[in-house]
Amino acid sequence: MSSSVATLMSKLSRRIWIYASVAAILAVLVTERAGAQADRGQPRAAFGPTDFRKLRWLEGTWQGTSPGQQNVYERYRFVNDTTIEITYFGDAALSRETGTGRVYLTIGRIYHTFGPGRWGATRIDGSGAYFVPQVNARNSFDWAKEDADSWTSTLRSSATGHETVTVYHMRRLRAP
């Protein structure tokens, strides 16, 4: 083999090695990025009936207030060991129903639904719960128990391009 062919082969080998290295690095970066996006707090922990019972404090009728927002009125009712029905009202007299939702346990996951939206729980414990968007939803929310008759609901949304946080202070109107 002539020296010019050997030099050409050497240069070609280096280029192939460089291209292969760059391709490998890009593949790792793309995989890590996809994994990080898919991993944005999506439910992973398996929940059971014991975890679901930790939400019993929600049962009852509540009024929520937040500065600059209309009051909200919500009723949480345990149907069984795996389902909570939620009824939303547009008035303090609870005479105008505006929607329904539910929180339920299925196959080791706890979900919250409202209309076409679904959120998955990433945390359920004695102090509250945290839900992230899954289907037809863009906001996450946190329920934090304060005492037997009050809790906060913190909604976080970045649908407009910047994060908006709304905190409702929930006060019990009626026990279950």
Image (cartoon, rainbow, N blue to C red):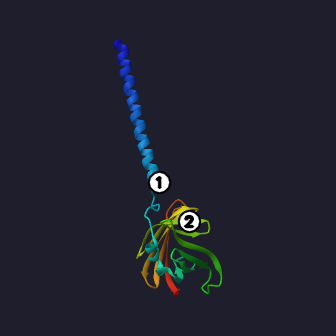
Q: Position of residue 51 (x, y in %)?
A: 44, 73
Q: Which amino acid does label 2 sit on?
A: Arg
Q: What residue type is labelled 1?
A: Gln
Picture layout, residue 89 above or below residue 15: below
Q: Where is residue 154 in the image (x, y as percent from the top left)?
A: 48, 72
Picture layout, residue 61 above or below residue 111: below
Tell me if I can see residue 69 in this picture.
no
Residue drawn at 47 percent across, 50 percent down? 34
Q: Name the residue under label 2.
A: 118
Label 1 sits on a secondary structure element that is helix
Tell me if I can see residue 103 in this picture.
yes
Q: Position of residue 74 (x, y in %)?
A: 56, 80
Taking the image as shown, residue 93 lies to the left or right of residue 2, namely: right
Mark positioned earlier in the residue sequence (2 or 1): 1
Q: Mark 1 points at which residue?
A: 37
Q: Residues within 10 Å of mark 1 (few under 14, many from 20)?
A: few
In front: 156, or 164? 156
Picture layout, residue 67 above or below residue 22: below
Q: Distance between the residues labelled 2 and 1?
A: 18 Å
Taking the image as shown, residue 108 lies to the left or right of residue 91, namely: left
Do tag 2 and tag 1 residues touch (Cβ < 8 Å)? no
